[in-house]
Every structure is written in C-alpha cells, then in structure tokens.
Image (spheres, grey):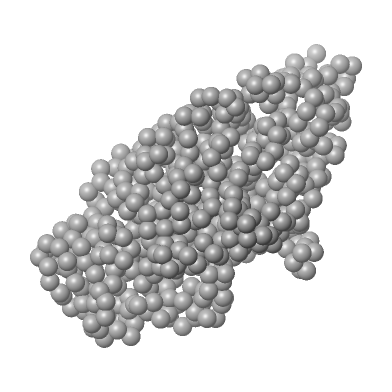
Amino acid sequence: MAAPNERLLHHRLGAVVGDRGVDFRVWSPGTRRMELLLESGSARTIALDAGEDGYFHRRLDDVAAGTRYRYLLDGRGPFPDPASRHQPEGVHGPSAVVDPRGFAWTDQAWPGIELTDVVLYELHVGTFTPAGTFAGARERLPALRELGVTAIELMPVADFPGERNWGYDGVSLFAPARCYGDPEDLRALVDAAHGLGLAVVQDVVYNHLGPDGNYLGAFSPYYFTDRHQTPWGQAVNLDGPHNGPVRAFLVGNALHWLHEYHFDGLRLDATHALHDDSARHLLAEIADEAHALPGPRRLIIAEDERNLAALVRRTDKGGLGLDAVWADDFHHQIRRRLAGDSDGYFADFSGSSDDIAETMARGFFYRGQMVARLCRPRGSDTAGIAPERFVFCIQNHDQVGNRALGDRLHHQIEPAGYRAALALLLLAPETPLLFMGQEWAASTPFLYFTDHNPELGKLVTEGRREEFKGFAAFSSPEGRERIPDPQAASTFARSHLRWQEREREPHASVLRLARALLRLRGSMVARGQRDAQADAADPSTVVLRYPDCMIVTRLEGTGRTDLSRWAGSRTWTVALDTEDPAFAPDSQPARVDGRDQRLAVDFRRSGAVVLQALPLGPNP
C-alpha cells in the first residue's frame, strides 16, 4: 500500500519516527512549559518548543524505537502521550516510541475489497481464541477464509485499563492494547489476513473515552464540551471553541489506523453521539480523508441508531459520504419474531412477515414513521440506496453482550428456526455480519466484562445489575445476583470460544450450513444476483426473489407456501434446504411441488429452501 501524501502527514501528533530522527508533537493550549521526560536509554528531561495554536514540538536524532517517555506540563505529571503508539506498562505508564517502518509488509499486491463482496465477521480479540492475542487470532484466519467470510471486524483494540475489556473504554486511542500484543503483532495479523484474501476493518470509538486513564483533560480543557451531552457525560468538542485541534486529533487517529496498520476500513461506534453543528460534519471529514488515501478504497461504516439515510448518501447529494451503516431493524424484527423479545426497543417491532420483508426491501424499517415508545418519528427515506450499504445481523456484540446473561439467539430458539434465520441473513442482498462463533452455534455466551480498579469496578458491577431491575427475571436482589459480575475473571473466561466444539454435533452441522450458504452467496454475487425483491408470501413465510433464484424462509410452524405467482413458466430445482441431513441431525426437509404449472413448498417445520431456476431453453 502506498504512503499518504504530505498533506495527510502534516501535523501528526505523538512520537513520529522519520529519517532525521523522532518528532515529538503534542497539543496543550494554556501550558507554558512542556517537557519531555525520557525514561529509558539516555534518561533526561528536554523542553519542547512552543508553536502556534498550543502545539509543542521537538525533533531528537538520538532516540531509538522502544524508548519510553512521558510529558511534564508546567511541572505536573508525568503523563503518557495522548497520541502514544504503545503503552507497554498499561495506560497509566510511560509511552514507547514505535517505528512502523521496521515491519516487513508482504501485502503490496493486496487489491482491497469492494463493498458488494463484503461478508463481515465481528470478533473480540481477547475471547476469540484461548490465547486472546493478535497472534492467536492470526492462527484462526484460515478457518475464517474456509468459512467464506471476506472481512474480519475487530472490536476496538485501542488500549484500555486492566487486562480485559470490550474495548469501548479505550483511552490510548493510537496504541493497540498491550494485553493483545505489541504493534508489530497487530500489523502481522492484518498482513496475514491480506495474504489469505481477507480484508480487516477496525472498530473505533470517537464519541467518548473510558473513565480510567483518560489524560486528555490534563493536556487541554477543550477536548470535551458541555455544549452537548452524551450517555457517557460531556461530548467530545467537535464544534465549540478550539475544536480544530480536537477534530485533527480524531481524523489523524483514523488515518493512523488506515495507513500505519493497513486496515481496509473503520467501523465508527455510536455516531449518533458525535454531536457536531459545524458546516462540515466530522463524519464527512473522516470519510473524505479516508477515501483520499492512495491505494485500495477504505470503507467507512457507521453505527447509528437514527436510521439516517444521509449517512451513506454521496456528499454531492447532500449526504455524509460514508460507505455503509449498521441497520439493526432487521435484527430486532427477527429477534421479536423468533425469540419473542418485547422489552425496550423491541416493542417498536412486530416481527411479522410483512414487516420483515419491508425491512429487507428498504434497509431500514423505520423511515420516518412515528415510534409510539419515543413519541416522535424515526428514520428517513432510503430510496435509491444500494442494499449493500446496510449491514444486517442476527447477532453482534451489543445484541448478545448487552443481555444480562450474554445469551445468543440460538440459545433461545429452536435449531430449525435458527437455521432459517441464518439462511435469510446470509442470502439477503444487504451486507451480512456474523458474530464470532455464530457460524457453529457456539455454546458460550458473550458477557460484559471489565478489569477496572476496585473502586470503579464496584460501581460498574452495581450499575450493571441495577440496569436490569426492570426485567421480571431480575426484579429481586436475588435475581440480580445471577447476573455475572463484569469484574470477575470468570466472566471473561466464560466468554471465550470453544473451538473444539465445531467438530461435534449439534455444532458441526450448523458450521456446514454456514459454509454452504456463504458458498451459495459467493456464486450469486459472481453471477450478478445482487438485487432482490422481498415479499411476505404468507404470515409465516418471507420470500427473497433474485433473477434466477428464490429463498423461501418459513419462520415458524408447518404449512404450505404457494409460490405460483412468482414461478412463471420456468422450472425450479432445490439448490439448498436448511433441513437437509447434512445441516440438521434430525432432518425434516421440505417438499417442493412443481407439478401442473404450480410451485409450492410444504414445510414440516421452520426452514429455508433455496430454489434455483433452470436455464431457459432456446426459442423454437
């Protein structure tokens, strides 16, 4: 991958290694004297030169990679670098100089990935493998390639306090979490993925920093503002006084991951909490800068609860120019239908076949309709937006881990219904996302876990249990005691995948199904089968219609689904049945009736059948 041009390298913060030494650069308006405290090698204290707009800078030609350092601000501190590339002793310790030029990349021929080819696989590095490291994840990449995914999405790896965390409490935004490995290990993971034909997307958090180890406020009072509030307190200052350096810090962080680690894209967490009244929104700025990087196009994906089509519309059409957005309405409809969830936002969804089909046809279900629970409209019109710009899932870290017991969808519903939902997800025209272990119906939960200091950790534990007191199962103190303690090491351990179970039932057959579905999806994409019509064939069945195939999904119960209205004069054959013996140990396959110009499927229980139209013969 080519290096970015000089415009993008200008004003890089942190300790940046170059041909003429190491440039130390930090922003701290209001500080009179900024001192660099070198703590290894030739230990000494050096005053930085004050520049314009509160920046301090100094170039040193006798500092090597690995040197540990911190800053003294008017004698206060010492504090780690806000743009540290590595925190080998944790987020409260000294920063370390990193030379990214020392890594021997082998991905020069990597072409990148087109959005239409993306199948995402979300994973948490710490629980994905027994080792819980970048190196451990690298060893499992061939299995993901064999599965048929095309891009892995790492939950946030920016360094956080303690040894275990989901990653959304990150405070050293430029430094990979040292408990997963060093920066070279992360580069090796990305390089190996590219060698196998896998893209890598990184989850980043710009709407807040974690509560422990956040030293930005020591350097400047302008990183945060009380102009806006978020669920985590004050908002990041994107539109108040001195917002320019704050925005540059975040844009620079995005480019840092894309350039120095060769990531193929970023998933931006909770963009609805990025409050920005500027003429040009930060999201548009990040997207524009990322897309301007030389080499393959980088993908910028938002997580946003507002259902705003403008996020993924082109900037010349009044949009923000992002590539895709998480579209959770599909998850909510499926969960409501199959698991019966009705608390909180699930109350906004019916789970009916009509509404599921509508969601699949439009990307969002809510596109401006009134939401009774919110007493206001939600969403906007999605007309003209390609389906691949919507990321669909039936599991992700939030929708599993934010449940009190971390239970997955397949822990709550019948296997046949889960197989049907998996087929609907993986054969939809939208971009599918799998959550680690979903492909084999993993037995393990994904729980909420932290490793904060005892004082903060106690508050986290209490808050977690208080959060669920409104649910009947946890309304009593005894019930809430059943909720795993986020601070307990056992909670983290229970969330680790058990890879060995992939080889035995009932997991092995689900894995075979996931592989078969993704092979089928790949062949459909290769044939140009990218746009589908979604319809409710009856109250229990959703049909996806591509030019030469139909996916008929029975969500519950037995019954006959008549497809004659869509069959035409073509001959149809079964390409896949989720109840085939290879995929269902207690197989109950559907029966297809194609006699007498009719087409119907008789389901013996929930399931999905893929019907392939045979090629039309030559004209007589």
Image position of 582 with respect to 606: above or below:
above
Q: Position of residue 230 (x, y in %)?
A: 56, 71
Out of 148 and 446, give the one closest to the viewer. 446
Question: How many marks do you count on the picture?
Answer: 0
Identity of the residue drawn at 27% across and 65% down: 93
Residue most toward the top? 620
Residue most toward the front? 478
Residue most toward the right? 596
Q: Quadrant of the C terminus?
A: top right
Out of 327 and 463, give the one closest to the viewer. 463
> Which quadrant of the view contains residue 522?
top right
Residue 5 is left or right of residue 502, and the answer is left
Residue 13 is left or right of residue 501, and the answer is left
Identity of the residue drawn at 38% across and 73% down: 216
Q: Position of residue 474 (x, y in %)?
A: 66, 57
Q: Position of residue 387 (x, y in %)?
A: 65, 46
The answer to whether residue 154 is visible is no
Q: Position of residue 357 (x, y in %)?
A: 77, 43
Image position of 339 with respect to 278: above or below:
above
Out of 168 and 113, give the one closest to the viewer. 168
Out of 568 and 102, give the one closest to the viewer. 102
The answer to whether residue 589 is visible is yes
Identity of the residue drawn at 42% across and 31% down: 142
Identity of the residue drawn at 32% across and 48% down: 181
Residue 361 is left or right of residue 393, and the answer is right
> Which quadrant of the view contains residue 94?
bottom left
Residue 567 is left or right of residue 81, and the answer is right
